[in-house]
Amino acid sequence: MKSRKKAAALKYEENLMAPTVTASGMGHIADKIIEKAEENDVPIVYNKELTDLLCNVDIGDYIPSELYEAVAHIIAYVADLDK
């Protein structure tokens, strides 16, 4: 059985305790999340395992501490892109 496309969006600001999940979904919703990111020049990082885990976090919630290291790598990568 073919798995459905998934996507999750994160928000991180220095004054926040941790990154928060701002959107997540599968199929058509995932397509829309990616489309909005592209329209707004938001970097997209493809990581199936992390996306699977982030899709289990409620919208608006901080990411769980178990994901801090993986998400920190993505934040560092995006920060490098912004330079």
Image (cartoon, rainbow, N blue to C red):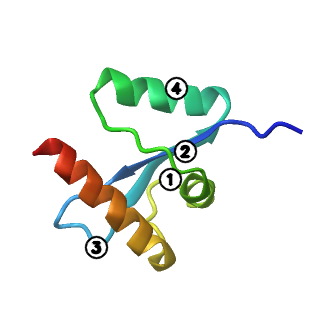
Q: Residue type at mark 3? A: Met
* Residues packed near mark 3 inside 10 Å, few (<14), some (14 to 19) or many (20 plus): few
Amino acid at circle 2: Ser
Per the image, label 2 sits on a secondary structure element best described as strand
Residue 53, image quadrant: bottom right
Residue ID for mark 2: 24
Q: What residue type is labelled 1?
A: Ile
Q: Mark 1 points at which residue?
A: 59
Graded by Cα atoms within 10 Å as few (under 14), some (14 to 19) or many (20 or more), the crowding at tag 1 reads some
Looking at the picture, tell me which residue is in the foreground, 60 or 42.
42
Q: What residue type is labelled 4?
A: Lys
Pick whichever of labels 4 and 1 is earlier in the sequence: 4
Image location (x, y in percent) of residue 5: 66, 36
From the top left corner, tell me how far across and down residue 80 is, in percent: 18, 51
Answer left or right for 47 relative to 77.
right
- Residue bearing mark 3: 17
Dot 2 and dot 1 residues touching (CB under 8 Å): yes
- Identify which residue is drawn at 20% across, 44% down: 81
**Quadrant position of residue 56:** bottom right
Of the two numbered discs 2 and 1 on the same chain, state the one appearing first in sequence: 2
Characterize the local packing of mark 4: few (<14), some (14-19) or many (20 or more) Cα atoms within 10 angstroms. some
